[in-house]
Amino acid sequence: MKRKPTGFTLMEMMITVSIILALGAIGVTLSKTSKQKAQQTITLGKMRALGAAFNSYTAEKGGLLPYEDSSGTDDWANAAKTENQDAWYNALPKLMGAKSVGELGISNPELFYDDAYPLYIKGAPYPGKSKRMNAPAFAIGMNSRLQRKTEDGLKAQGRFAQIQEVGKTVIFLERGLPDDKQTMSAQRGFDGSPKANARAFAARHNQKGCLVFADGHAEIHPASKLMTAGGAIV
């Protein structure tokens, strides 16, 4: 009477390996999904805090909006100038208990890229150390359509009263950095500047990104909610 083999057959071995590989792939996918959800939750919390700081600023300033950027270049030295202290990235972090971008540029620019800093977005593809130390690379931008030019060609400080639908008007958005992936072909302007329009919207969280509205609330949306496939802003 023949004895049955006690080891794995080749077929059994192949099935076992396939199961292990499949389970491994599922584990990697679940891990990636969990990480994305965690980053989305953190980003949403930071953007809500930014919205609250925006509302505090407008209340303290009699309805004036912070400036979308500095006059001149958007480097560390210019951000630190006295005339640029009402730029949103200087005024709002201070209302959130943090240093302004201008102050960081003088003392320690690397802190701008620290997880704890209110304008840092975890998971955003910030540039390498040599480039990002020349100027702050913003993963959040202020809506560039809020500040209009005067007859003299100067951009005046906007007013909250000019916003007709505060619950639908975007104030801040996740904005594209040079290495961010575009989710629509008509997107452009992924340059990391402190202001942005809808075409520069970065969808970093499973092809969705975070928006802050004038009433202070924040939402997650795909880029298709802000612009058409042809590039027209909705």
Image (tube, rainbow, N blue to C red):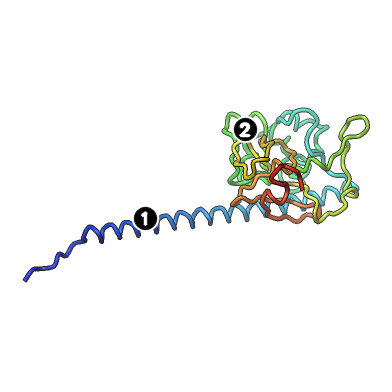
Q: Residue furthest right?
A: 151
Q: Position of residue 25 (x, y in %)?
A: 42, 55
Q: Is residue 6 left or right of residue 144?
A: left
Q: Secondary structure at mark 2?
A: helix
Looking at numbered disc 2 in the image, what kind of residue is underneath it?
Arg
Q: Nearer the viewer, residue 43 or 7?
A: 7
Residue shown at 82% from the left, 39% from the top: 67
Residue under circle 2? 132
The vertical placement of 169 against 195, above or below, is: below
| Residue 87, numbered label | none
Which is in the foreground here, disc 1 or disc 2?
Answer: 1
Image side of residue 134 versus residue 57, left or right: left
* Residue type, mark 1 in image: Leu
Quadrant, the N terminus: bottom left
Mark 1: which secondary structure?
Answer: helix
Label for residue 21?
1
In front of the other: 106 or 179 = 179
In the rendering, at what x and y percent does residue 71 appear? 81, 30
Nearer-the-camera pick, 44 or 200: 200
Q: Nearer the viewer, residue 189 or 141?
A: 189
Circle 2 packing at 10 Å, graded few (<14), some (14-19), many (20+), is some
Residue found at the very far left of the displayed protein: 1
Q: Quarter of the image holding residue 128?
A: top right
Distance in Å between CA atoms under marks 1 and 2: 39 Å
